[in-house]
Structure formats: C-alpha cells, structure tokens
Amino acid sequence: MMPYSVADTVRQQPLSMQLAAVLEERILQNVYPIHSKLPPERRLAEEFGVSRQSLRSALNILSTRGMLHARQGDGHYVSDYTQGSFRYGWEDLIDGREGMESEVLDFRRGIEGMLAALAARRRTDADLLRMRLWLDRLHTARHTHDLDLRSTADVAFHQAIAEAAHNLLFTRLSDGLLRLLTKQTKTNLANMFDVPDVEAELLAQHEAIYRAIEAQDETAAMQAAYRHLDYVQAALDSRHRQMARETVSCALAEGDKRR
C-alpha cells in the first residue's frame, strides 16, 4: 500500500478527523473487514507520518461512532456496526418465509451479473490475485471434502468480485447480503453435493467467471455469472424434487406396513 500523506486531505479539518476519515474509508472499502484487527498503532502512525497520540484520537473517534471496539491489551477491531442497518428487516424477511431461497437466488443473479461486468471493466492485478486465492482454496476444499472451507471460499470469491467493481455502495450491499446468507450458502452446498458431478461443475463455473474478468470481457463475465446462478437454482430445484419424491415413497411404504 502506498504511504499516505495527511497533506492530501482537507487541511481545515483537525488532524484526528482527517485520520479518522481515512480509516473509516478503509473500513467501508473492506480493506479492514468486519471483525478484523487493525494494524498496530505504531505501524499506522508511521504509515501516516503522525504521532501515536494523534492516531489514538482518531481511533477514539471511530470507537465513539461504533465502528471500532477496543480489546484491552489487544488493539482495535472493526465492529459489525456498519452492517446493522442492512440486517435489520432483511434477516426476518429471509428467515421467516418459505420459498425465499428461489427469490434470493433471483436477486443475487441480477446483482452479481452486474458486478461481474463492472469487475471486468475495473479490476486491478491485485483484485485478480485475491480472486485466484479464493479459487485455489475452492480447489483445496474439493480435494479435502471440507464443507466449511468450501462455503467460506465461495462467499469470499463472490465478495472479491464485488470489491473489484470498485463501487462503495455495491461493495457494502454485496458484503451485507453474503454475510447474511453464509449459513444458507453452506446448506445449499451440502444439498447440492448429492447431485452427481455438481462440485466439478461449480468449480468450472467459477473459473469461467474469473477468466472473463481477467480478460476484461464484460459481456462474458456477466453471462458466466448468470450461468452459475442459474445452475445453482436448477441443481437445488432438482434436489428438492428428489426429496419430495422420497417423502411420498416413504409415506406409501408406511401405508403398506399398516395394511
């Protein structure tokens, strides 16, 4: 990361406010993700070229706003305050209704197709490295049959695409939605793995999205994202139909026993 000069900020503001604004921007851009620990005070003070006292004042400002919380002897951590307004209402809507799985995937299809196209247009080499990191972890999860890693890497890969779009509103929307759906993603993956060859197909789809973004082909990236979520929807529908058939078969078998 390039060294930051406080001279680049608005000079009329107090130094502590300038530093707080820079740190807040990093939090909102997911440079410091929710629940992550900020770098040590000494390192940040050296990076900004300021005293530790000025830096502490900035950290106190963000703590007062609820964006950070201090752990005695362990530094400052990013709180989930920024996600509170997103979760409010959405969590009850998604968890409290039947049939929301299909609507969530439909919503994600529109959002993630657009984000993939924007990522193809705006991605940096560093963005590609992050996507490749999570793709490699998806491959590792497949070989080790690690469902926790699989769901974590899946969510992180899609969030890396959102962040490669370099639009703060989309970044926060995607981050909030994917965090909210982490449990559902893990459940969906567990159910889908009962469908033959599904894991290999999902990996191929993620690779196709990555290659289109790498090639900066906006149309191909959008279409690859659409195909991926359409496949997820179809695989889950197939699984649900099979479960419904099994339920009927079990009921018929129980009826036969009672005759």
Image: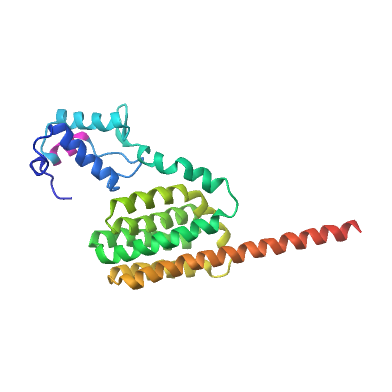
Q: Which residues are magenta?
A: 41-47
Q: 156 or 231: nearer the eye?
A: 231
Residue 83 % position (x, y): 38, 42
Residue 25, compared with residue 12, is above or below; it is: below
Model colouring: rainbow
The image shows residue 50 at horizontal and vertical percentages of: 11, 35
Residue 114 in the image: x percent, y percent?
Answer: 36, 63
Query: Is 79 situated left or right of 143 in this image?
Result: left
**Residue at image point 25% right, 40% down:** 24
In-front residue for pair 177/35:
177
Magenta stretch holds residue 42: yes
Specify the quadrant of the image occupied by residue 80. top left
Classify residue 75 by image quadrant: top left
Any part of residue 168 in sight: yes
Q: Is residue 194 visible?
A: no
Viewer-proximal residue among 70 and 60: 60
Asked if the magenta segment contains residue 67, the reply would be no
Image quadrant holding the C terminus, namely bottom right
Residue in the image at 53% along x and 67% along y: 198
Across the whole image, how many numbered discs are drawn on residues? Answer: 0
Residue at 35% over, 69% down = 221
